[in-house]
Image (cartoon, rainbow, N blue to C red):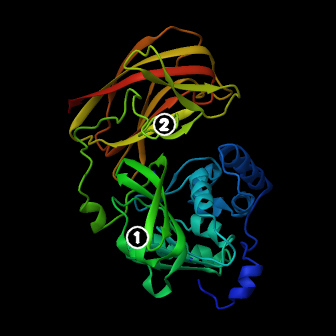
């Protein structure tokens, strides 16, 4: 779940000598963690563009998170930045950036400034970045932060991102870091011929990245990987055709039978790491999801978000079928195979979690069930399953939710 390019006039200078962050507090430990972030969470997971990797190593992500969260700045996770928004995980920022392939002489529009982190990464790769944030306090804070850090080729404003920024159009590239139900027409109009846009589309908790390329005035779409972004605040969000039902939470593709694009990954499951679909004599249907890891501490997982109204739902009974093979815990105490459900309140603050497992050793297929108490203030949840840093193999199938009223 994640949050939502300043023209300077010195265009030629910027194009040949791109801005970098001014010296700021960057302890050696942070530099080490930043290198590790790029190596383990970004490059190893498939981002190859050397310029993008260089920008990710350069931008001080700890400057874009709240003070109390700085120790977590270089982990591959979303972090709350206030006003129901989050800073996107580093992999997502790098992935989106690589997909649109920013060039040194280009002008890029970002929808959803959030903390300003994505804009800072882009600023190291292109000539001009224009960024719009609908949440006024976040927009003002991001503008001040980017100015303080020396990103003079980034211009921000507070407003409706889906309306774009017509006076600075057309844009070579557009990056949308919030999730509309459909592609906003102003963004289509403001994308330059031959330009690229990356945008997460779909229902609030079921989104897929799409790469859109403008050819002969029309958009050619390529469907990419599933993702989960914080919805845009405002009228566009409230007027969605399909709204989540927090009184009837459910998982999509719970038995892993769907793989519409035949890429070997289960549809509807986000941030799959070292996971693949296996077909055969499955406990349910003909497919299951397998997690495999041989490096202690490395992530192997899949997750899915949902709305859940804790004022109406008192408990959730989760059942599933699993099998493990030579499963051994990782170096940290919580790095064990299993499932975790994380609960969040209306401000997207963590208010509880429950664990199913852990499962270690070697077993045949086993049925597991657990009744979990839902915190009364819950509005959202994320269900995560995998090895979680353990080694070995974990096979999972037929995950089910049964809710009981409060």
Residue drawn where x is 65% and y is 81% of the image: 152
Residue 47 position in % (x across, y down): 66, 51
Residue 4 showing in the rendered view: no
Q: Give the side of residue 346 with respect to residue 10, left or right.
A: left
As drawn, the residue found furthest toward the bottom would be: 9
Of residue 31 and residue 228, the one placed in the foreground of this image is 228
From this viewpoint, which residue is outermost toward the right? 28
- Nearer mark to the viewer, of 2 and 1: 2
Above/below status of 73 relative to 219:
above
Q: Which residue is mark 2?
A: 262
Q: Nearer the viewer, residue 104 or 367?
A: 104
The 10 Å Cα crowd at callout 2, few under 14, some 14 to 19, many 20 or more, is few
List x then y, in percent, for residue 336: 58, 24
> Which secondary structure lies at badge 1?
loop
The numbered mark, 2 or 1, whose residue comes first in the sequence reads 1
Residue 144 shown left or right of residue 104 in the figure = left
Give residue 135's mark.
1
Residue 395 location in percent, x, y? 51, 20
Which of the 4 quarters of the picture holds residue 201?
bottom left
Label 1 neighbour load within 10 Å: few <14, some 14-19, many 20+: many
Judge left or right: residue 332 versus residue 225. Answer: right
Give the Cα separation between the discs numbered 2 and 1: 38 Å
**Figure quadrant of residue 287:** top left
SS at badge 2: loop
């Amino acid at each position: 779940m994640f949050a939502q390019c300043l023209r300077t006039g010195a265009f030629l200078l910027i194009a040949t000598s791109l801005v970098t962050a001014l010296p700021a507090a960057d302890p050696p430990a942070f530099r080490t963690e930043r290198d590790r972030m790029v190596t383990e969470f970004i490059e190893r997971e498939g981002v190859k563009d050397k310029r993008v990797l260089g920008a990710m190593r350069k931008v001080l992500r700890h400057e874009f998170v709240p003070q109390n969260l700085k120790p977590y700045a270089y982990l591959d996770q979303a972090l709350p930045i206030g006003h129901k928004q989050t800073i996107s995980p580093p992999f997502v920022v790098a992935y989106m950036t690589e997909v649109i392939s920013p060039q040194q002489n280009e002008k890029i529009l970002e929808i959803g400034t959030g903390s300003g982190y994505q804009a800072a990464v882009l600023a190291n790769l292109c000539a001009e970045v224009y960024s719009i944030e609908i949440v006024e306090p976040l927009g003002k804070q991001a503008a001040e932060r980017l100015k303080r850090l020396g990103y003079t080729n980034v211009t921000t404003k507070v407003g409706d991102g889906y309306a774009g920024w017509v006076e600075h159009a057309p844009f070579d590239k557009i990056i949308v870091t919030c999730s509309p139900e459909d592609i906003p027409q102003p963004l289509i109009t403001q994308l330059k011929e031959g330009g690229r846009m990356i945008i997460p589309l779909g229902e609030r908790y079921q989104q897929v990245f799409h790469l859109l390329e403008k050819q002969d005035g029309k958009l050619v779409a390529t469907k990419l990987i599933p993702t989960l972004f914080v919805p845009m605040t405002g009228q566009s969000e409230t007027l969605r055709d399909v709204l989540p039902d927090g009184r009837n939470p459910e998982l999509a593709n719970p038995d892993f039978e769907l793989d519409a694009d035949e890429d070997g990954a289960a549809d509807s499951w986000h941030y799959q790491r070292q996971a693949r679909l296996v077909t055969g004599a499955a406990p349910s249907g003909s497919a299951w999801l397998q997690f495999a890891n041989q490096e202690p501490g490395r992530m192997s997982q899949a997750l899915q978000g949902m709305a859940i109204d804790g004022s109406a739902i008192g408990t959730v009974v989760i059942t599933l079928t699993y099998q493990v093979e030579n499963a051994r815990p990782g170096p940290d105490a919580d790095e064990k195979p299993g499932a975790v459900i994380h609960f969040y309140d209306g401000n997207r603050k963590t208010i509880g979690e429950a664990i199913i497992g852990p499962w270690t050793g070697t077993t045949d297929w086993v049925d597991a069930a657990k009744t979990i108490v839902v915190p009364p203030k819950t509005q959202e949840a994320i269900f995560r399953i995998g090895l979680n840093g353990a080694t070995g193999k974990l096979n999972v199938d037929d995950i089910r939710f049964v809710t009981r009223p409060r």
